[in-house]
Amino acid sequence: MFPFTRKRKIQTEAIKADMGADDVKLPSRLEEKIDLLKPCLAKNDDIVGRPFYLKGDPGLKAYVVHLEGIVDNISLQQDILRSLMFYARGEDCKEKGLEYIVDHIYRNCLTVTQIQKIGNFSEVIRAVFDGFVVLFFDGISAALSIDIRKVDRRNVEEPVLERALRGSKEGFVENIVVNTALIRRRLKDPNLVVKKFTVGKRTRTDVSLLYVEDIADPEIVRNVSEKLDNIYMDGILGTSYLEQLIEDHHYTPFPQFKTTERPDKAVMELLEGKIIVLADGSPDALIIPSLFVSFLQASEDYVERPIISFYHRFYRYLAFFLAVSLPALYIALLSFNPELVPVQLLISLAQGRDKVPFPVVLEVIIQEIIIQLVIETGLRLPTPMGQTVGVVAGIVLGQAAIAAGLASPAIIIIVAITTISTFAIPNSTMVLASRLVRVFMILMAAAFGMFGFSIGWFLLLVHLISLESMGVPYMAPYAPMRYPDFKDAVYRTFISQMLKRPVSIPVQDKVRKRREDG
Amino acid sequence: MGKLLKVGLFILFCLSSLAGCFDAEDIENFNIPLIAAYDVAENREEGVDVTVLYPNVAQRNREFVEKISGKAIGDTRAGRGTRYPSTLLLGDIQVALYGKDLACQGLGPYIDNYVRDPRIKKSLFMVVVEGRGDQFLERAHKINPYLGFEIPGLFTSKKKNQFYAVTTLHDFFHAVNTAGKNPVVCTMEVLPNGQYRVSGTAIFKKDRMIDVVGMDETIPLILLRGEEGCCGFIPFVVKKDGKVIDKGTVEINSKRKVRVQREGEKFIFYIKLKITGRLVEHYATNRLILEDKNCIKDIEKALAGQIKKEGVKLIHRMQDEWRVDCLDITKYALAKWRKEIKDVVEEETFVKNADIRLEVEVDIPFWGAKN
């Protein structure tokens, strides 16, 4: 076993042990409960505690605790406090006992829907910090946690990274409830299962696992559930954390799970037997398992006509090849195998390089560094400023470099085509992977020419073929060959002919459309 | 991690032992020969003069010529290395010019280096120069700044021009090494003012040039050889009662069909040329009404007769003078009776005694807008 794996195991066990430390049963007396809460109340000024009396003769002492700004104040006042203070029947407690009051309040007084009875102090703390309202009653050991959270959220808007000319303009937001609803609204199948998890000891992030029960492979569902259950991190701040924690291969630059910002895309994937994971705070969904081909597919592929989709997909494959290979090919051809370049182009390239003081390799590496800096700068700066920097860097810097004899016109074109091709890849994680693989290819070509370039691609393909996404071969349907899935690989056939689900993804119900369905 | 590192290091070691960045040389450090001319050495008893035309990368609009003499082609490369710092990039040679004297000696020794080097493309064009190759290059490049691209252009765009032989290194090598085949190579000449042109065709007996024919005989030669995609402009004259009644030009496409029969030791070759064409122009002002189909019939008949006459003349010359199969028809006999005749096809008597019959069929379906 690798040393860092051992270290991680020790760390997770420590966190697990720590989580059960405050598990004390709640006392009956209200004062004792408040005493238990006091350390928390003293430390956190945003925790609000308010004593009150339930209506009755005599009125029952009660205490409400919640986080400021998270709960819906109007709902708290009208649906909880008002109901309890004016309509709760404290007299009934005398007849039926104090423990009855909780059921009574639950059934007769409170108009909110999400109420839970809790009995441990750790549960109280969790509920308060999860944003619930917690009610304590004097003489009753149980408490009630009520969900009336109201967090300001972004409106549902068009996705930023997955824009489509045609089709839905709705994108996920940071709220997991809204995101689940966006999927539910599109997939009204009662077999759609939403399984909730709370992940992260301190962040207590809500995570939902969505799958269609009679389509998705139970083995994959079980695997993903187990992996989510076994996450012992103190902080999970989105799907990207989950992705890294549940993936099989940590050392690859290639993403093993696709993310999407589009609910329509998520529904499409659910119907192919895949699993969707949503995390609160993330405006995207994880798709499990994901194949390499899916990273080069866009949701609008299924909106356009098949031949148009094929045309677009072909260019995306070409873009991936160019993004990974073009600078490496430039080095290999100009420094090792110039015979492979048509003579007129070769002379033109030689003329362009005549005044450049750097060897081809160094020229490419310098330009690669510059373009990576420009991309990083463009991403970090505010949008209008980022665009300006991009234009200045692209045009002014390029022209100046040529005029100063520091770069040849050809390398500027090569870098420009490479950068454009990089961003033609529809998935942002695959874009990052292609940028890293490009560096590897450049080094291989710089060391060994066309031979190195070939070996580089060979190693890349071997690596890709060796990858799995939740046990599913990453390069399917190409390796292993799954001929039926070729109908939705580079070429997409007519939707009416997609009668079966992809065989690359294990599913229970292989038939998508039966003839008798019409 | 340790295992991964070990495997990575092992792969890196294997790769570094196979190739290395030591081979890298950037293109601006190369001289890229576009045309190379080979001649019998002027100042030596034995050997070869190699003259090479390069594009001038620095000046961008001029080409320059280097001439080096040596015992053999490899020797000239060694000699060049002592005079010029730049490396030769042999893979981009477009045309190899051979002086007439060298061609008469046989080109075998002078194409050997090309055939052996995998970097050199086998599609480079071969040309025999009237006179010396070095003089051709030195004169022609002075008034043609892009000679290195113009001469190869003559051969890549031959379908739009005229009838002349286009022979690549592969064609030549294949013909030299195949029983019954003999190459023909285009000849070029340079005029005193520096202009150059295709002047005819060199007839080879294997790798040795035995004769040169002019452009008049080149047209029937190319038609009879049945060159792939052979097309071009051909003039015609229509006579009636010994009097010229029409003349003009037809753009033709030609297809050859060869049939062979054997009567004992005698081989009868039937060559059928099927020529289709487009009337480009004709001067018979009193017969401009093209709906008159007889006019076209007359042109077709005249053209067929003209091509047949020239073809028969060429066949007789081939059988009587050269006695080699320069029409590439022996392969049809070999296809049928290879075992029996493979040893005799190279003999002069095989071609001399063969009965070669020519039939020409001309069809001009397109004769203008009034059609």
Image: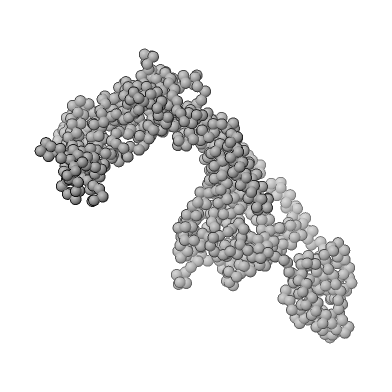
> Which residue occupies the foreground of this view, A175 or A21?
A175
Residue in view at x 57 percent, y 62 percent: A265
Q: Position of residue A391 (x, y in %)?
A: 61, 47
Q: Is residue A6 visible?
A: yes
Q: Position of residue B284 (x, y in %)?
A: 18, 42
- Res A137 → quadrant: bottom right
Q: Position of residue B171 (x, y in %)?
A: 33, 33
Residue in view at x 63 percent, y 41 percent: A369
Residue in view at x 23 percent, y 51 percent: B371
Query: Left or right: where does residue A193 sit relative to residue B42?
Result: right
> Which residue occupies the foreground of this view, A77 or B244?
B244
Instruction: Assign the N terminus of chain B to one quadrant of the image.
Output: top right
Query: Left or right: where does residue A503 sit relative to residue B356?
Result: right
User: Measured along the vertical axis of the image, is residue A91 above or below residue A248?
Assistant: below
Q: Position of residue B21 (x, y in %)?
A: 56, 32
User: Measured along the vertical axis of the image, is residue A175 above or below residue B111?
Assistant: below
User: Measured along the vertical axis of the image, is residue A140 above or below residue A92?
Assistant: above
- Res A26 → quadrant: bottom right
